[in-house]
Image (cartoon, rainbow, N blue to C red):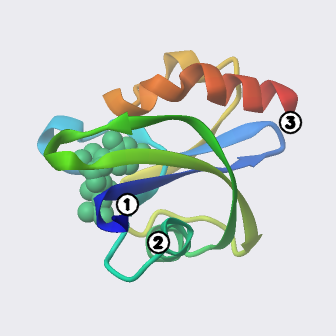
Amino acid sequence: MNVCVVVAAAIVVDGRLLLAQRRRPAALDGLWELPGGKVEPGETPTDALRRELREELDIETEAGERIGVEVPLADGLVLRAYLTEIVSGIPRALDHAAIGWFSAAELPAVDLVPNDRMWLPDLERALRAS
Ligand code: CDP
């Protein structure tokens, strides 16, 4: 039932995590998230992540290990994050208001979307280990 999954990417380069700043919906406007989106029918979760990152950030990527717990969302959706490598391209915000790169020390002060706050300890650990 891949249609029920939302995938998100934890991209770490040089000890910094890429986050993207949402524009919508109004309740999340200005908050930062791991980029990603809904798995569409016929896609695997990692296919969907590759597509979303191409559409949103203009990069080619390869999903690796899962990171953090699966977070239940409204409407039967679940949110899942993958450690993800950039294969080619330089990320730029095609859909978000902005992108930013954040160190482990900076991360706790970032205004993350509420769901992604669940992953804070995992993300800090991944950054410190990188
Ligand atoms: O772009 P698409 O409609 O495929 O997905 P989205 O609107 O970006 O995300 C679907 C749902 O997952 C929304 O409720 C988002 O707020 C949520 N989401 C999240 O909580 N954290 C993320 N890192 C990505 C999405």
Disc 2 beta carbon < 8 A from ligand 1? no
Is residue 37 shown above or below 42? above
N-term mark: 3 or 2:
2
Residue 49 versus residue 11 in the image, above or below: below
- Asked whether mark 1 lies closer than 8 Å to ligand 1, one says yes
- 25 or 114: nearer the eye? 114
User: Residue 48 — which label?
Assistant: 2
Q: Is residue 71 visible?
A: yes
Q: Name the one closer to the observer, 6 or 100.
A: 6
Residue type at the position of mark 1 = Gly
Horizontal and vertical percent position of residue 7: 45, 56
Residue drawn at x 55%, y 65% is 92
| Numbered disc 3: secondary structure | loop
Give me the C-alpha separation between circle 2 and circle 1. 8 Å
Q: What is the number of the mark on residue 37? A: 1
Whether the residues at callouts 3 and 2 have beta carbons within 8 Å, the answer is: no
Q: Residue at (47%, 71%) from the top-left corner? A: 48
Quadrant position of the C terminus in the picture: top right
Residue type (three-letter) at the residue carrying disc 2: Ala
Q: Residue at x 30, y 67 (%)?
A: 3
- Tell me if label 3 and label 1 are in contact, CB under 8 Å: no
Please give left or right for residue 125 compared with residue 58 in the image: right
Mark whose residue sits in front, 3 or 2: 2
Location of the N terminus (image quadrant):
bottom left
Image spot of residue 117 (x, y percent): 44, 25
Image disc number at residue 130: 3
Residue 76 percent location from the top left of the image: 20, 47
- The type of residue carrying mark 3 is Ser
Can you see residue 21?
no
* Mark 3 nearby-residue class (10 Å; few <14, some 14–19, many ≥20): few
Mark 2 crowdedness (10 Å alpha carbons): few <14, some 14-19, many ≥20:
many
Tag 1 or tag 3, which sits nearer the N-term?
1
